[in-house]
Amino acid sequence: MSTTNAEPGTAAAPTTARRLSLTSQQLNEGGLAVALIALIIILSFSSDYFATVDNMWAILGDAALVGIVAWASTLVIVAGEIDISVGPAVAFWSVILAELNGKMDLPLPVAVLLTLVGGALVGAFAGWLRARFGVPSFIVTLGLWSALRGLAQFLTNALPIPVGPSPFLDRLGGKIGQVPTPAILMIVLFVIFAFVAQRTAYGRSVYAVGGNARAALLTGINVSRIRVILFATSGAMAALLGVVFAGRLASGNSGAAQGLEFSVIAAVVVGGTSLSGGRGSMLGTLLGVLFITVIGNGLVILGVNSYVQDVVRGGLIVGAVLINMILATRGRASSR
Amino acid sequence: MTTSTASTPSPPRDPTTPIAVITSASKRYGGVQALRDVSLSIAPGEVRALLGKNGAGKSTVIRLLSGVEEPDSGTVVLGGTPLARGGVKAAQQLGVRTVYQELSLIPDMTVAENLFMGAWPRRGGQIDRRLMTRATSDALARLELDLDPRQPVSALSIADQQLVEIARALSQEPALLILDEPTSSLAAAEVDRVLTAVQRIRSAGVAVIYVSHRVSEIRQVADTATIMRDGQVVDTLPMAGVSTTDIVSMMVGDADLETPLVTTAAERGPVVMRVEGVTVAPKLAEITFDVHAGEVLGLAGVLGSGRTELLAVLAGLVRPDAGTVVVDGQRVDGRGLRHAMSLGVGVTPENRKDDGIVPDLGVDENLVLTDWKKVTHRGVISTRRLAAAASRAITSMAVRTNSAHTPIGTLSGGNQQKVVIGRWLHAGSRVLLLDEPTRGVDVQAKAQIYELLRTLAGQGVAVVFVSSEMDELPLVCDRALVLNGGRIRDEQVTPHIRTDQLLLAAIVEH
């Protein structure tokens, strides 16, 4: 705690605190952007292939496979909740799409719509268990995490199920011109979610619930409804990513998106969102998603042993959050 | 007492040497002089009541004795040893134990584990449960408590938990035991058990400082009383032979110094809220009153009087066992806060920090939480309308903030409170239920809040102002009801609201 000029404190304190708390978020995003650029420069010098246009599009395409669900997850985490079921949910809904479209011969638009609605309903159910009975969201989604993967494997005997041939799905899993379609989808969703988070009553209510659920309740905010919507959105986005996966693999695959939930949570947390709720930004998560994808891409290009890749990735994620925490504590200490 | 002779290992104390002596102690917190030249002395085996209104300095005295704070000037001497900079540890070594009003037991651990918290007896690397259970039984027996030491604390009644807490303090052989409002959350029958325990403790030669608002129980248990007012000791005198009226007048002091904002009761508008026969056993019994548009209705009551429970019923948060609360012909009781809100009821919680503000959100967003619709179009926030609503509220209530976006957590308590009230004005509430709106707020902000309430009443808003600080009610209220033991004991109308009468009605046992 600095004591140097704390004396005229009472009057000056709000000013200092405000300036620092503003910088703390900017510091976060700025620092992450700098780290990202540094990483890209280092990797460009280390490998000839890394800095090619092809690879940049590939990175964006890979980022989309995390980002499409990461935006919804950011809101979930800002509200002080967590959804760890996204990986199995993606696999499950890709299987369901294949079952509906490939096996049951439903027209593709109907199958896609049913898949998305199903994802939203399962998510809403999880949110309802949380909101109505107070079951911790970690437990509810842990149950889903296990059940959805199991169900997907049971339905398919763990074999891929082909989807019917469809130019739409091919395009969804492929490219438009040079650009991977999932990347476009990710960017569009980013804009929507960033807008919702910052500029809508719903988005701000999510921050209020995460910042102080009791206070939010006592101002008449329908906290239960917000929790249900949060998980429904997260479920729908997982189903959407399931559809993308089905397009990419031309099949529903019960083994898809292994470990996705951890990449998503890592990206959100690296992006500066507080796991205890109330704080976080979409821009931070975007940077977090890119950071994690670039690391993954770089490690592959450098030919690092795939097991060692996991170790390095783990270390970098903890390191990034650690630096974040240290900066935040410093900021708070000097504002006293 | 006869029962505890065998198990009284406490050393015999010279009854003439005082156990604790405070000599001309003064203490400031920021701009507030909490204690001014306070001296007091407590002898072994003495039960001393500490009396005073909120903010009189009782808790500061307790903090000095238990080593949480040290005085700016003056000394604290415990058992002949000055307590200098030693803090809580030193005070404990010198034999001071404090039982605070909030329970500090861990509910899911057993009585025995709680009694030995952090100092569990060990044998061969594991906790010696048999020894612990036996020692706990002994400690409980000293208070004639018949509880199973292996029971989890959560299975006990609040009174038993309070007694376990006292037993824990006693098991550490204190010379001075401080009890801070030990009975405020207890029903009458349970209070007697605590009082019996205190008498037992006294007979073992332990000095007791007993803080309570309930005069009748103080009469039963205390030998002497120290009465405090405005950070000073008014007098220390034997309880025998002093009347409750005298005590109250010492607590209140001379006439109210501040000039009231209301001199004659406002012309009352129509009834907006009708409360009839509201009963919540065992906290509230048959509460009946009306709230009129354009009045500030004070609801006075000390801790444990039922004021918090009553407010929860009025806001629709708690369903009463009997009785109704009606706003504009519609029932509110037990129908949920949102229903009450839709009828124009707004409520600000007693605990502003935990239940009131969303600290990381800006002042503007904290202001509009109650009604987003006023600043949105199809769910999308209009930056312009949000800024306009915020600046209107900030100006009209003189909220001191750097900008409308400043996180509310960085504002002072008084300014936070204005925002918390302001959010209901934003929602257009016509009945405001304010639970201790001036708690933890500085003098200037208090005056501003009083003024705000008068202005609102002038505009036809009905304000229910809950307070345990009796001297602020005459300043701002048109009418005041006194709640004591879950019943309304008194009603006073401006200009005849008198602090001493309110206090008397609030603390005398009926």
Image: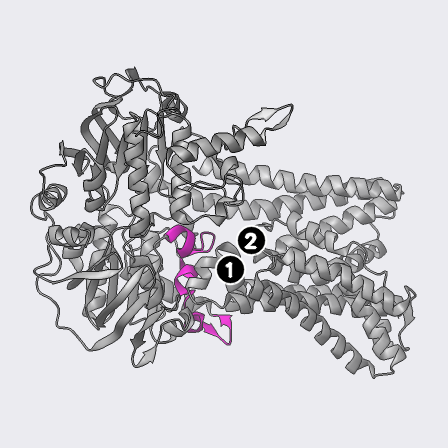
Magenta part of the protein: which range?
Answer: B352-381
Q: Chain of mark 2?
A: A
Q: Position of residue B439 (x, y in %)?
A: 29, 49
Residue A209, numbered label = 1
- Write the residue at 71% across / 53% down: A289
Dot 2 alpha-carbon crowd within 10 angstroms: few under 14, some 14 to 19, many 20 or more:
many
Q: Is residue B434 above or below residue B445?
A: below
Between residues A8 and B161, which one lies in front from this camera angle?
B161
Between residues B267 and A44, which one lies in front from this camera angle?
B267
Between residues A206 and B12, which one lies in front from this camera angle?
B12
Q: In the rendered view of the protein, which quadrant contains the N terminus of chain B?
A: top left
Q: Please state which amino acid type lies under the numbered disc 2.
A: Gly
Q: Is residue A182 above or below residue A33?
A: below
Q: Position of residue B33 (x, y in %)?
A: 22, 35
User: Residue beneath label 2, please?
Assistant: A277
- Drawn side of residue B184 relative to residue B169, left or right: left
- Write the residue at 40% across / 50% down: B353
